[in-house]
Image: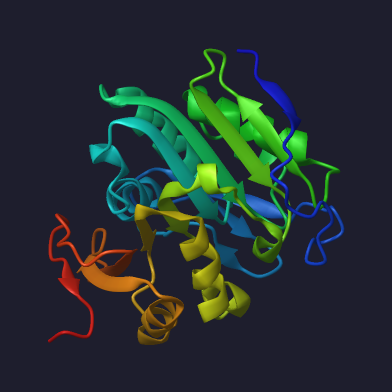
Amino acid sequence: MRRRADLFDSGSPMKSKGYGGGVAPEVEVFETSDGSMTLVDVARGVHYRSRHGAVQESRHVFVEGSGLVGRAGTWRVLELGFGAAVNLVETVRAFRESEAATRLVYHTVDWRPVGPEALTFHEGEGGELARAAAAAAQGRAGEAVRVMSDDGCIEVVLHAMAWEEVRLGEEERVDAVYHDPFAKEVNPEAWTMASFAWSLASAAPHGRLATYSAATAVRKAMEEAGWMVWRAKGPGRKREMTVATRSDEPLELPGSKRWGQG
């Protein structure tokens, strides 16, 4: 299927001090415990998604944890960490399955995105969009590229730059923030108060952040940035995950409870 790709001008700087010279990382495909695939960064030896179930983690933590699946109308997402594109593919799948959703606008930020050849294991429309975005971003360090679905209902914007350089407009405020960079040990800058203040500034009043991390230091950084922090049941064998909101209205997620309140 044909995908239209072009440059996207969000008003953000077009050159990135953090971009890795335009060279995609060396990766290998890895089969996780639920039979779904993810990638491994060869140089750093880190997995892009949980080894215990890539799709399971993506659906539970991000697609469902963010509250997107219960929304009608337009879905707007800001993702930190394009990675192996599992979240994008699963969000596209959930969007097409929804009877109430009408449009998906998916902003994803990765200072060093993988090449399209690394994403051949993805099937269906989500896989096609992921590969098209990755291909469009090649050689465009510090730029943002946009890919549209054939029917115009899905828009994917891949920002090939550091997160500090991405600024969404007031009309682009998102419903869901997928906070999904590599772990703090590998990418500490992405787990600071500054990074969570950045995502908070792009979230709509009802916006919700979801992440796989349950670390106390991470939750403290979220709280310091202005998010209201909740703990919730994690995917599979993982005991907890973290969700953050801009309001203190109770969450509908299993096992959810305000963090720090008993």
> Residue at 52% of width from left, 76% of height from top?
191
Q: Horizontal and vertical percent for residue 183? A: 51, 72
> For the image shown, how many numbered marks are present on the structure?
0
Q: Horizontal and vertical percent for residue 3? A: 65, 19
Query: Is 97 left, or right, of 262 in this rendering?
Result: right
Task: Report whether residue 152 is seen.
Answer: yes
> Residue at 33% of width from left, 75% of height from top?
214
Which quadrant is home to the N terminus?
A: top right
Q: Horizontal and vertical percent for residue 32? A: 41, 52
Query: Is 104 left, or right, of 98 in this rendering?
Result: right
Q: Residue 57: name its quadrant.
A: bottom left
Q: Residue furthest front?
A: 170
> Residue at 58% of width from left, 26% of height from top?
128
Query: Is 92 left, or right, of 110 in this rendering?
Result: left
> Residue at 38% of width from left, 65% of height from top?
212
Which quadrant is home to the C terminus?
A: bottom left
Asked whether 54 or 262 is in front, the reply is 262
Q: Horizontal and vertical percent for residue 200? A: 46, 64
Asked whether 26 or 129 is in front, the reply is 129
Task: Report whether residue 192 is seen.
Answer: no
Q: In this view, does 259 lie above or below 2?
A: below
